[in-house]
Amino acid sequence: MQRLYRKRIVLGVGGGIAAYKSAELVRRLRDHGAEVRVVMTQGGREFITPLTLQALSGHPVHLDLLDPAAEAAMGHIELARWADLILVAPATADLMARLAQGVANDLLTTLVLATDAPVALAPAMNQAMWRDPATQGNAQRLLERGFRLFGPAAGSQACGDVGPGRMLEAEELAHAAADCFERALLTGRHVLITAGPTQENIDPVRYITNHSSGKMGFALAEAAAEAGARVTLVAGPVHLPTPDRVQRIDVVSARDMLAACEAAMPCDLLIAAAAVADYRPEVIAPQKLKKDPTRGDGLLLELVRNPDILATLAGRPDRPFSVGFAAETENLLDYATRKLRDKNLDLIVANDVANPSIGFNSEENAVTVIDRQQHQTRFSQASKGRIARQLVTFIADRLDQS
Ligand SMILES: Cc1cc2nc3c(=O)[nH]c(=O)nc-3n(C[C@H](O)[C@H](O)[C@H](O)COP(=O)(O)O)c2cc1C
């Protein structure tokens, strides 16, 4: 059930007898690849110990709203933002009543009010409590506010009654939780992305580099992670924060970048957005180069070719679906098409870095994607984040067809 892979679920455990099933639920959610943080109500703690749920979730259980130490570790707002889904199981009649009123008198109810994530409730109570018009009214109100209700099922109950009010079983709840997520485009795929410039040292204080800011590659890494991929981002020297859920490897030179990419292989998809230096000084001077009067006014630097990262990776027997970037200042589509062919790529993204409103260092971009049949698809000027999401959707579609 790939849809739960790497999803962040806050599991709220209320004070009902079905809390014992929450332990199994944590296991099931984690088996399906979800990351689980548990929040317990005061009542929940009377039915199952935080220690059990801590051991099963692999993280300390969140208990109190007004606990300075817990707030310092991961505050309630942070936890509310962290969640992709809040699942309350069991949801007691009392908890549902508080949620329906918008009460925020403990950690769980406060989180529910503070989150933008979807909230799902798994009601669990005696059949008479469930049938009571007050509970039915609360359930209706919660549905109208966009909460999802998983169950309850009907059957024999812990109290000896028979009727509706049983909490769904753990596996049923895990499936219902998965249904809250669209199937992500790159779920289960490993995506390797390069970004930024490389830096080729001349001596201990000087180097050759270029104007790449890394913004496009980082935006692609973020978009690929959002699309469910496991993302490895190999970044040259840039000052950008690492996108959420992305594994970042920092490198300096083109040769470092190739080594890091080779170590990260195999991957399903390679997006090479880095502006890699084609040449490097043949010799890196061990000491700072001094002005040398015997040489006159000039200084000749001998440069040698760097390895071609994209062609190397796209030429491997386990070659991934390979997407290159062509940053050009003239003959854009012509050069890009040649690069696609010469490097054995599946797609090339051409961008005109001579235009100051797009390309290097700017916040926006506009690109044309060319495929092996030389079909061109244009993505008109927009923020790099938006272009990245459009490109990821386009590339994922081609990857699926490959
Ligand atoms: C032994 C026992 C079992 C209970 N089981 C349930 C239950 O299954 N469902 C329910 O809605 N309330 C149940 N309750 C009542 C709740 O614990 C109580 O209403 C509490 O305030 C729930 O709030 P909380 O979910 O925020 O902890 C039970 C109480 C006791 C003493």
Image: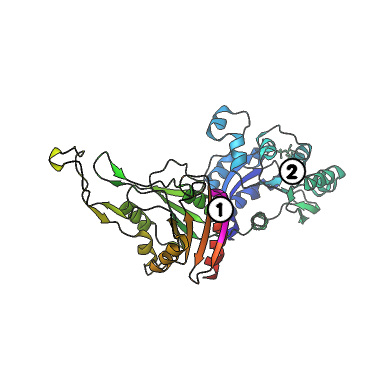
Residue lying furthest front: 297
Query: Measured from the top left, where is residue 245 in percent x and y?
Result: 51, 48
Q: Looking at numbered disc 1 in the image, what kind of residue is underneath it?
A: Ile
Q: Which mark is residue 92?
A: 2
Residue lying furthest bottom: 373
Residue 52 within the magenta-colored segment of the rendering: no
Apparent side of residue 174 relative to residue 362 in the rendered image (left or right): right
**Colouring:** rainbow
**Is the distance from the Cβ of mark 2 to the nearest ligand 1 atom less than 8 Å?**
yes
- Of residues 54 and 338, the one nearer the viewer is 338
Query: Measured from the top left, where is residue 27 in percent x and y?
Result: 57, 52
- Residue that appears at 54% across and 39% down: 60
| C-alpha gap between disc 2 and disc 1 | 45 Å
Query: Measured from the top left, where is residue 268 in percent x and y?
Result: 46, 63
Establish if 79 lies above or below 217. Answer: above
Establish if 76 lies above or below 284. Answer: above
Q: Quadrant of residue 201?
A: top left
Which residues are drawn in magenta?
A: 378-386
- Of residues 207 and 2, the one nearer the viewer is 207
- Residue that appears at 56% across and 53% down: 387
Apparent side of residue 321 relative to residue 49 in the rendered image (left or right): left
Q: What secondary structure is marked by label 2? A: loop
Q: Looking at numbered disc 2 in the image, what kind of residue is underneath it?
A: Thr
Q: What secondary structure is marked by label 1? A: helix
- Residue that appears at 56% across and 32% down: 70
The residue pinned by badge 1 equals 387
Query: Measured from the top left, where is residue 162 in percent x and y?
Result: 80, 54
- Of residues 309 and 162, the one nearer the viewer is 309
Q: Which corner quadrant holds the N terminus?
A: bottom right
Q: Quadrant of residue 265?
A: bottom left
